[in-house]
Image (cartoon, rainbow, N blue to C red):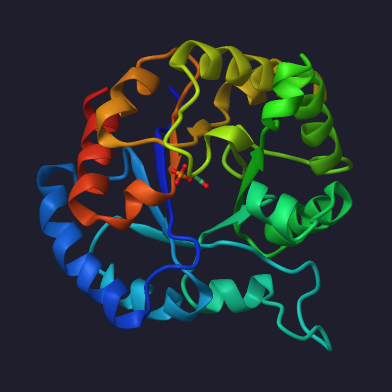
Amino acid sequence: MRKKVIAANWKMNKNRGEAEDYINKFLPLLGNINATDPEVIICPPFTSLQTLHDAVQGSYVKTGGQDIFWETSGAFTGEISAPMLTDCGCSYVIVGHSERRHILDESDYNINRKIKSSLAGALIPILCVGETLQERQNDLARQVVKDQMEKALLGIDITAGNLIVAYEPVWAIGTGVNASPDDAQDMIAFIREQLSQLYNPELASAIPILYGGSVKKANMHDFIIKADIDGALVGSASLDPREFSEIVRSVKNG
Ligand code: PGA
């Protein structure tokens, strides 16, 4: 049985006070689903990581960074390394989010380096892949995702517990227009096939693969009932503690 995972990506939202306030509301709302299945991960901005980590103490909620640099220390202005993230209590880190790929020109080569540094630093990367609307319309979605997977994982040894993949079609992120659960299942099964070819079928069947893109409490159930979808990476809907707790509940009951 694969682990179910539900991860919040707060993006550039919430300062320390807001993060603390959120957790004070969110943990009681989790109630009897305060356990590791699903694994609940919150990725706040770097500046709120320590506050968030302190606030979730005594609960099962884990924390993660939204990005990482590939070196551990040195003259890299503005960057944050794996040891810095673990020092703030992180166990996860998002790598290759589409906003970084598209707004900040992040390359597949750098994403590969970031996956390597995450693993070397005992962080579990949440590798994001996904096609643009134009690529989908031109029937290139599978090729794009295959390419992103191959380049991100080039030369990297994976074990069942040290990778999460998130399929996030770019056109579904922050738009309110989610992929259909059937299309998401289709692509996620394809991603699992890629993992099987890159590694082996056992490993591929053990790696959690999430859907991301306009997930909310009203549609989470439709995704989680699909055979290959193991959870979600949630942006806007994770900013509200009640909405996010309902999403977690859907996954738990899914
Ligand atoms: P969204 O963002 O849920 O707001 O669409 C998802 C993401 O960027 O991970």
160 horizontally vs 147: left or right = left
Q: Is residue 55 left or right of residue 129?
A: left
At 66% from the left edge and 70% from the top edge, which residue is drawn? 82
Q: Residue 61 location in percent, x, y?
A: 32, 57
Query: Residue 184 at what x, y percent from top left?
Result: 53, 19
Query: Residue 117: x, y in percent?
Result: 75, 62
Position of residue 227 relative to residue 4, above or below, is: above
- In which quarter of the view is residue 253 placed? top left
The quadrant of the rendering that contains the C terminus is top left
Q: Is residue 158 visible?
A: yes
Quarter of the image with the N terminus is top left
Task: Report the front residue among 133 and 124.
Answer: 133
Residue in the foreground of this view, choosing between 173 and 80: 173
Residue at position x 49%, y 36% in the image: 213
* Residue occupying image coordinates x 55% and y 72%: 86
- The relative height of residue 206 versus residue 163 in the rendered view (above or below) is above
Say left or right for 184 vs 152.
Answer: left
